[in-house]
Image (cartoon, rainbow, N blue to C red):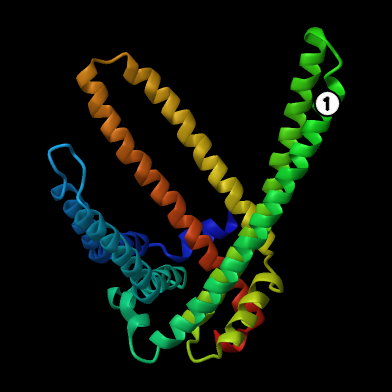
Amino acid sequence: MFKFQLDYYRNGQGLHIKTILLTILSSIIMVLLMLIPGIAFIIGGFSLAASQDFSGEPSGGGIATFLISMVIGFILFILMYIFILIPIAYGILKFYKDTDLGISPRFSDLFMFLKKGNYVKTLKLTLIIGLISVAMYFIVYIVVIIVEVIFFAIFGTSMALLQPSSGSEGIGAMSISFIVIMLFMILVLFALFIPLYYFVIFIVNTVLVHIDQRSLPTITKFSIGWNITSKGPHSAWKLLFSNLIYIVAAYIIIAIIGIIAAVIVSLMPSVIQILFAIIGYILFYLFMFAVFYFLYGSLMNFYHKNKNALYPKNN
C-alpha cells in the first residue's frame, strides 16, 4: 500500500536527518528572503498609523503612502517568489532526489538553479508551468461553478416538489433530499479534484527531469515528464491513492491520539495543561512534517522507478 514511501525510507537510510535539517535551514532562508517585501508592508502600516489625528482618522498623505507601500510590497513579493524562491525550491527538491538515490545532499545545491547556465532555463520552465497552472485553475473553477449551479437547480426543484407536503413528513423528506444531493455534490467535486492531483504529479516529474537534465529543450522535459507519469510500469494512480490513504491515516492517528491526550490532560492542573498543550502542538507539527517529508519522498521514488524503466540509458 505504501511502497513508494517505504522504498524512499529504505533508499535514504542514514541520510534522512541531514535532508530534514537542510530542508528546515532552507525554509528559514526563504522566510528571511520574504522579509524583504515585508519591509514595504511594515512601512505602509507605520505610515498609516503615524498619520492619524486625534480622532483616529489617517491623513490623505498617510493613506497614499500606505497604498503605495502595499503595491510595492505586493510587486516585490511576486518578483521574489518567481525569480528567487522557486529556483531555491527546485534546490530543495534536489535534496529529496539525492536522498532517494542514496546520495548525501549538499547545501550548495540549494542555489544551483540560481547559477548562470541554469537560471534562465529554470525561469522558462517555471513560466510555462505557471501558465498551464493558471489555465487549469480557471477550467476547474468554471467546472465547479457549473456543478454548484446544477446542485442548486436540483435542490430548488426538489424543494418545490416537496413544498405542498405539510407537517413533519414533508420537512423530513426535504432534509433527506438536501443531504443526499449535498453528498452527491461533494463526491462530484472530489472526483473533479483527482485529475488535479494527477496533474501535480506530472508537473513534479517535469521539474525532476529539469533537475536531472537541464540542457534538454523545455518541451522535451514536459514530454519526458508526461511519459514518466503515464507510461511507466508504476501507475501514477497508485501513487495518488497511496498518498491519499497515507494522509487520511495520518490524520486519523492524530485525531485518536489528540482525543486520548485531551481526556488525560483535562484531569490535570491548569498549569500542566498549558505545558502539555505547548508540547502537543510541537509534537503535532513534527509529526505532520514527517508525514509530508515521506509524501514528497514518495514522489521522488516514483519518478526514479519509472524513469529508470523508461530511460535506462540515462540512469
Q: Quadrant of residue 55?
A: top left
SS of the residue under disc 1 = helix
Q: Quadrant of residue 268?
A: top left
Residue positioned 35% across, 46% down in the render: 286
Q: Quadrant of residue 257?
A: top left
* Residue 23: percent from left, percent from top: 33, 62
* Residue 165: percent from left, percent from top: 86, 14
* Of 136 and 250, the residue lying toward us: 136
Residue positioned 68% across, 56% down in the render: 142
Determine whether, in the image, residue 160 is placed left or right of residue 136: right
In the picture shown, does residue 15 fall above or below 55? below
In the picture shown, does residue 231 fall above or below 241? below
* Residue 35: percent from left, percent from top: 24, 62
- Classify the position of the C terminus by image quarter: bottom right
Q: Is residue 238 visible?
A: no
In the picture shown, does residue 256 fall above or below 218? above
What amino acid type should be assigned to the residue bearing mark 1? Answer: Ala
Residue sticking out furthest to the top? 167
Residue positioned 37% across, 61% down in the render: 16
* Of 264 and 169, the residue lying toward us: 169
Q: Is residue 144 visible?
A: yes
Which residue position holds label 1? 160
- Count the numbered circles shown: 1
* Residue 85: percent from left, percent from top: 35, 70
Q: Are there few (<14), some (14-19), or many (20+) residues within 10 Å of tag 1?
A: few
Determine whether, in the image, residue 89 is placed left or right of residue 191: left
Determine whether, in the image, residue 176 is placed left or right of residue 201: right
Residue positioned 52% across, 56% down in the render: 6
